[in-house]
Image: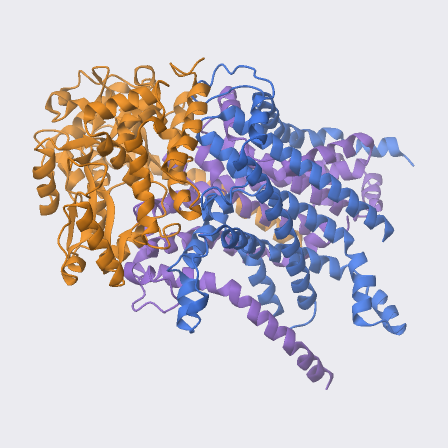
Chain colours: A purple, B orange, C blue
């Protein structure tokens, strides 16, 4: 009985949500259908089903766009950037939060200041040149890590505030050293915030376009989001291939998101909300 | 709990490692499996994305297959290309080969300072039109074309036929053609939103208005050395005003701010629109999009050009060699290989044109292109487009002048004089900032 | 207790790697730009910029396009912050209940911010074009009179970018709000119900005040993100029609493209200044209301 009433009560919000979700479905459906159409169908920009699904679009884009090489580079850059971001930013966030003195609070605001900063292309160029780092994966990775620091430090710091200190104290009494304290005691408890930052970092690094374009210097290093431009440009009418390239670009990151999404809410609960 | 986390870290590590292994594996595979082949060599290059033509790709593939020379080609989005080219060259990290229009590139970067002198290369003697790749008497580029062709009205012959229209020879006839089409529910003239499209009217118009190569060169020299202003030339102003009048008369598609070039091809090919002012290169693209279409080209009659001369695009896609390149001999070898007829002809496989070298087959031109060529170019009734003369301003155009051309008909608040007055201010600032000769006071 | 001893277990040295990377690759370039913004640094003469005082800044503030971009930036940042927050909160309030398909809806609403701005920009260009999906759809359901060339006028173009940005990020805020709502102990609501407080009353007197920490995060991220907007505008309108939808970050990029590196640096320094000021004021406001709650 109660369940029935509850169901009825929830039917109106359900319909509202269904309506809203149309706005989210339609662009994605257009993209997926478009990737399976031929050239003349795709350029009509409608939601009609393709007459014959053109799976060969995928074969063509993968080959012509050197997508596999792009995947490889994106994997390398994204995974290293993400691991470094979590380790470097996580340690900083934990330490700032636990020390909680004037100096570390100062550092906290110093990191937060990064939220206000935009990419300085020309200055970065001369900086990398003077370090002799221009055109290397490592330079691009370090730029990404630096860009992620504000958000990572911010969320780790507030998450750690919610972890009782007694836990650390017990571990210290048991004879834990610093390394063990961080990696064996704190890191496992910090899993939700680690995973939240992992997702957010993977998404932002994978999708970034300008940093790779300006600071890599060889087509062999090209990431997958740069390859869209092989199909989207001045003289191309190849919308079917554009849609295919879009789908191929987003598949890995959407997969990661679907896999890890359930941790986002718990990560946010303690990492962002309990200021 | 813990296991899932460590699984994730493991996975990330594994992708990292497999990525690195994969990268190395690739190299080994290509060197070990083909021992009988020539030693693998490699040069780097950068290319504008819209010019990654099938023909060029075939040349590169052939080079790799036969000579085992790989070109590491960075294909750059067009709107970022000039930024990247300039900043890379100026900070000394440019690749071995750099693509751009020749001779436009000489206005963007100082050839003597940055580019290798190619004058002594064997293929230079075979150039049909050596002047386009020369700068102060030296050849600094490898060019593919002797000329890109010319700028004229591309039109759909079937639409003209349906309304019983002939190619207009006078301004009055042109007006009648447009009115007939407009009344028949057809967009007379298509214009694309891409910022380099509207300006084709003016780069052609300015040169035609000035009337001769000498006059155009004199005009540009004075503009570039601060001896004259754009607004000092009423015939140039008239070219802008006549362009703006097309909008007032309702001859241009309403969505010219958003309809991109693909949409224009579509409208022209399907007969929703009748004409499109473009170049031989764009006509090629229209043909590729609608291989069964029936198109033609004619020179637009205008009030500011009574002599009926056509605007030429005597430039070429081409490569310059980085003077700071580590392996200049290899780069020159690649260019020599590209110049061989069996390579060079590939460039024209799907885009017939005018080859740079005298022993290369450029494919069969469309009749209309050949006719215009015979009627105008061969008879000397051609003057080069203004962009060629005003080369040093090319990095300014896309973010100022060309935007004004699109903005003026939207707001209706600028006439030709005001538009050029506004651009003059940008030019003054741009040249002063560079401390160009004539502007340093 | 043993504070000294304890601190040994959180060595400040562990902040150093983050500090070094962040300083070198975020702060140093900004300081360089700050320095260059007082010079005539030009792409054609990169080696020897000359000092020129405040000239670049004077030029910016007398350039109507820059002033316009400043106005657009503020308009964009505030309206997207408002929309993203309100829509995010609404979705969170609906989805905190046991609605059928709850998980799927959450996934779907968050999905857009997983896509890159380039992808979103390309998709929406295809939707908003004069022959695009939206107009085709309107035509096919007999609403032809509503068709419009959406990106061709200032009003519709800037509105489109605002809606698309909100579409992308509302789901992100929804997640933060869901987290915030879950953290509110249920006894608060029970007590309110006992006292006979209405739904509206409960919402404004319990839910909203207790969500203030979530609001702080959401608004800070939205406003800083909105002020720094670049990709979406660049891909979708590239500042057009004319210079109508130019924002500060695209303006800085435009100056960069003209080789005016000093002026470009000055524009990005002004932008950073605007972001710092606005987020500082907002943060103070939000922090003070947090204390009250």
Residue toward you, C218 or A196: C218
Residue in the image at 59% along x and 48% along y: C76
- Residue A217 visible to an observer of this rendering: no
Q: Give the quarter of the image for residue C99.
A: bottom right
Closer-to-camera residue (B434/C188): B434
In which image quadrant can residue A172 be found?
Answer: top right
Q: For the N terminus of chain A, which image quadrant?
A: bottom right
Asked whether, in this view, residue B38 is left or right of residue C104, the answer is left
User: Is any atom of residue B228 visible in this view?
Assistant: yes
Residue C197's spot in the image, x, y percent?
86, 71
Point 7% across, 38% down: residue? B374
Left or right: A263, with B51 as reference point: right
Q: Position of residue A36 (x, y in %)?
A: 34, 62
Judge left or right: residue C118 versus residue A265: left
Residue B279 spot, x, y in % from top left: 22, 41
Please name whichever residue, C134 or B432, is drawn nearer the observer in this view of the structure: B432
**In the image shown, does B39 or B154 lie closer to the viewer?**
B154
| Image point (36%, 52%), residue name | B259
* Vertical comparison of B280 with B31: above or below: below
Position of residue C92 measured from the top left corner of the image (x, y, whole percent): 68, 63
């Amino acid at each position: 009985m109660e369940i029935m009433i509850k169901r009825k009560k929830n039917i109106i919000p359900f319909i509202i949500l269904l309506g809203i979700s149309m706005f989210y479905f339609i662009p994605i459906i257009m993209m997926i259908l478009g990737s399976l159409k031929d050239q003349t169908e795709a350029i009509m920009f409608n939601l009609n089903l393709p007459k014959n699904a053109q799976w060969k679009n995928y074969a063509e884009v993968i080959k012509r766009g050197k997508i596999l090489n792009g995947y490889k580079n994106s994997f390398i850059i994204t995974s290293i950037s993400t691991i470094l971001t979590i380790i470097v930013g996580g340690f900083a966030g934990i330490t700032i939060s636990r020390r909680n003195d004037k100096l570390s609070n100062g550092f906290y605001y110093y990191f937060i200041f990064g939220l206000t900063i935009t990419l300085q292309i020309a200055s970065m160029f001369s900086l990398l040149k003077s370090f002799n780092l221009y055109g290397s994966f490592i330079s691009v990775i370090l730029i990404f890590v630096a860009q992620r620091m504000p958000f990572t430090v911010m969320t780790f710091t507030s998450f750690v505030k919610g972890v009782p200190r007694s836990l650390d104290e017990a571990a210290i009494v048991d004879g834990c050293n610093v390394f063990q304290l961080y990696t064996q005691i704190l890191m496992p408890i910090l899993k939700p915030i680690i995973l939240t930052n992992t997702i957010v970092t993977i998404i932002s690094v994978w999708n970034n376009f300008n940093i790779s374009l300006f600071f890599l210097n060889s087509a062999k290093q090209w990431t997958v989001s740069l390859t869209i431009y092989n199909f989207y440009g001045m003289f191309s009418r190849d919308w079917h291939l554009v849609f295919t390239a879009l789908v191929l670009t987003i598949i890995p990151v959407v997969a990661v998101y679907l896999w890890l999404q359930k941790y986002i809410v718990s990560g946010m609960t303690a990492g962002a909300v309990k200021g | 709990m813990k296991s899932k986390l460590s699984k994730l870290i493991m996975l990330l590590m594994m992708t990292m490692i497999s990525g690195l292994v994969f990268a190395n594996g690739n190299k080994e595979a290509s060197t070990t499996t083909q021992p009988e082949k020539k030693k693998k060599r490699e040069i780097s290059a950068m290319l504008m994305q819209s010019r990654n033509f099938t023909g060029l790709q075939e040349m590169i593939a052939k080079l790799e297959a036969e000579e085992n020379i790989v070109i590491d080609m960075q294909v750059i989005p067009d709107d970022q290309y000039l930024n990247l080219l300039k900043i890379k060259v100026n900070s000394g990290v440019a690749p071995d080969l750099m693509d751009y229009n020749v001779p436009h590139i000489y206005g963007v970067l100082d050839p003597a300072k940055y580019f290798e002198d190619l004058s002594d290369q064997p293929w230079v003697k075979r150039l049909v039109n050596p002047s386009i790749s020369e700068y102060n008497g030296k050849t600094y580029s490898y060019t593919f074309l002797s000329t890109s062709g010319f700028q004229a009205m591309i039109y759909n012959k079937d639409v003209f036929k349906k309304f019983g229209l002939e190619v207009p020879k006078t301004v009055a006839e042109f007006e009648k053609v447009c009115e007939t089409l407009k009344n028949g529910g057809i967009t007379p003239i298509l214009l694309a939103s891409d910022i380099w499209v509207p300006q084709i009217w003016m780069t052609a118009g300015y040169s035609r208005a000035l009337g001769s190569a000498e006059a155009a060169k004199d005009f540009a020299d004075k503009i570039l050395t601060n001896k004259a202003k754009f607004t000092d030339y009423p015939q140039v102003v008239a070219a802008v005003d006549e362009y703006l009048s097309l909008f007032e008369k309702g001859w241009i598609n309403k969505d010219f701010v958003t309809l991109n070039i693909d949409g224009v091809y579509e409208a022209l090919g399907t007969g929703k629109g009748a004409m499109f002012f473009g170049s031989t290169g764009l006509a090629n693209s229209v043909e590729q999009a609608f291989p069964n279409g029936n198109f033609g080209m004619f020179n637009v009659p205008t009030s500011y050009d009574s002599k009926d001369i056509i605007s030429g695009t005597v430039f070429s896609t081409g490569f310059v060699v980085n003077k700071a390149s580590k392996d200049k001999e290899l780069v020159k070898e690649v260019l020599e290989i590209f110049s061989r007829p069996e390579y060079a002809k590939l460039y024209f496989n799907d885009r017939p044109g005018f080859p740079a070298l005298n022993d290369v087959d450029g494919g069969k031109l469309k009749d209309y292109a050949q006719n215009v060529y015979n009627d105008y170019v061969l008879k000397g009734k051609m003057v080069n487009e203004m962009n060629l003369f005003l080369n040093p301003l090319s990095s300014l155009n896309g973010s100022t002048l060309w935007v004004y051309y699109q903005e003026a008909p939207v707001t209706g608040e600028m006439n030709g004089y005001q538009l050029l007055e506004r651009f003059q201010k940008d030019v003054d600032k741009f040249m002063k900032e560079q401390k160009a000769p004539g502007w340093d006071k | 207790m043993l504070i000294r001893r304890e601190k040994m277990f959180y060595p400040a040295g562990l902040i150093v790697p983050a500090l070094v990377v962040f300083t070198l690759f975020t702060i140093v370039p900004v300081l360089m730009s700050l320095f260059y913004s007082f010079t005539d640094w030009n792409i054609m003469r990169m080696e020897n910029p000359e000092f020129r005082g405040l000239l670049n800044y004077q030029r910016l503030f007398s350039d109507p396009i820059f002033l316009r971009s400043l106005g657009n930036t503020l308009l964009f940042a505030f309206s997207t912050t408002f929309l993203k927050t309100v829509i995010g909160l609404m979705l969170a309030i609906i989805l905190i209940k046991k609605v059928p398909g709850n998980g799927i809806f959450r996934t779907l609403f968050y999905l857009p911010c997983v896509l890159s701005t380039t992808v979103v920009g390309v998709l929406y260009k295809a939707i908003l074009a004069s022959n695009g999906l939206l107009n085709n759809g309107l035509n096919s359901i007999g609403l032809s009179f509503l068709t419009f060339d959406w990106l061709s006028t200032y009003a519709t173009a800037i509105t489109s970018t605002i809606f698309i940005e909100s579409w992308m990020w509302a789901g992100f805020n929804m997640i933060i709000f869901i987290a915030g709502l879950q953290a509110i102990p249920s006894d608060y609501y029970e007590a309110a119900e006992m006292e006979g407080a209405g739904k509206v009353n409960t919402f404004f007197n319990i839910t909203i005040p207790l969500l203030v920490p979530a609001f702080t995060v959401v608004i800070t991220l939205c406003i800083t993100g909105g002020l720094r907007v670049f990709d979406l505008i660049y891909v979708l309108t590239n500042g057009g029609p004319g210079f109508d939808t130019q924002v500060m970050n695209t303006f800085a990029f435009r100056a960069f493209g003209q080789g005016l590196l000093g002026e470009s640096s000055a524009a990005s320094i002004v932008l950073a200044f605007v972001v710092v000021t606005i987020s500082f004021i907002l943060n103070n406001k939000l922090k003070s209301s947090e204390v009250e709650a």
